[in-house]
Image: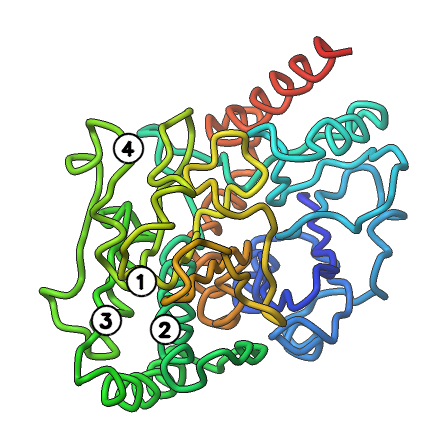
Amino acid sequence: MVYLWLRAETKAMEHRAALTPSTCKTLLDRGFRITVERSRERIFDDEEYEKVGCHMVPIGEWRKAPEDAYIVGLKELPEGETDPLRHTHIFFAHCFKNQGGWTDILGRFHEGKGTILDLEFLNDGNGRRVAAFGYHAGFAGAAIGVDDWCHQKLNPGQPLPPYKPFPNEATLISHIKERLGRAVALNNNQVPEVMVMGALGRCGKGACDFAKAVGIPEEKIIRWDMAETKEGGPFPRILQSEIFVNCIYLNQPIPPFFTPAMLDGERKLSVIVDVSCDTTNPHNPIPVYSVNTTFDKAVVEVVTKNKDLPLDVCSIDHLPTLLPRESSEAFSRDLLPTIIDLERRDQSPVWGGAEALFHEKVKSMKALH
């Protein structure tokens, strides 16, 4: 019997879940055992899990879980802890691309003889991720990008108010569509141009779909992907769009899309949304900021010599939680067949590949010491 333990998320403003009540019901019906930690932050009420038959426990109890339980989550483990980790964890560890602090988290697993099966690296036979939040990340990222552009017009010089999750896509679209109408009226009826980098991927499609949904005409949505960027950056064309949404998947070093010096000159660009959010990656192609923003303070100002036009960066690393119910349901539904494969994990190329990658990264970490 496969034992899954859904831990409560501790990251601020994280409302999503890797396993939804509907997914849990399917798994329970197959004979899985599921324990769920109670959470006031999760978009799904505890009662929704109880109703389908999950065993409920207090937050943080995963540390005492039986050795054979898979600890399932989404975002990073609680900060500031250093104790060894003995379980197999399924989550987005954010430590396989040499991000800041990557050796600390890997070291804890190595010391405790635990394992990371990273959700970001669960790939099928074609190298495609079996489940990803990419579409909703792009959708939400474009939403904040357009909203911040509107805010610059409607409330110049004022900080962008905090965001709270929206119940569904329709409510989010309606809210920003209304603001866009008022902002465009103050901008000589000129609609902003939105440039999407990585437009052909799941994330890029989400960004383009949002732009269309709020009424930005097709000719004002600039779609760039591999063909347009094959020569390598920098790309001055980005500065001609008011809003730039970066949706690429960074898996190797690339030249920057633009440099800080380029932003000092003439530009229309006033909002950058880095959905990819490779903030601490040494090869971040948007080298003009160094912090992750949050839903409480969604943008950080980039200081340039161009005093006529503000420039904001949004670098929230869990954008889909702006639409937590819809994004969780979509992700969990896509992940379900792979979770079922835990019944025969030793024969699964997806799980086998994830485990091999973990051991490879541990080996890299050990080579540094």
Q: Which amino acid does label 2 sit on?
A: Trp
Side of 74 where 121 appears, left or right: left
> Who's the residue at 90% across and 48% down the image?
64
Q: Residue 233 carries which label?
A: 4
Q: What residue type is labelled 3?
A: Pro
Side of 316 where 243 appears, left or right: left
8 to 255, vertically: above or below: below
Mark with earlier residue (3, 2): 2
Q: Do the residues labelled 3 and 1 touch (CB within 8 Å)?
A: yes
Q: What residue type is labelled 4?
A: Gly
Q: Closer to the camera, 172 or 65?
A: 172
360 to 113, vertically: above or below: above
User: Distance from label 2 to label 4 (Cα)?
Assistant: 25 Å
The residue that mark 2 highlights is 149
Q: Quadrant of the C terminus?
A: top right
The residue that mark 3 highlights is 192
> Who's the residue at 50% across and 34% down the image?
121
Mark with earlier residue (2, 1): 2
User: Distance from label 3 to label 1 (Cα)?
Assistant: 7 Å
What is the crowding at mark 3: few (fewer than 14 residues within 10 Å), some, or many (at least 20)? many
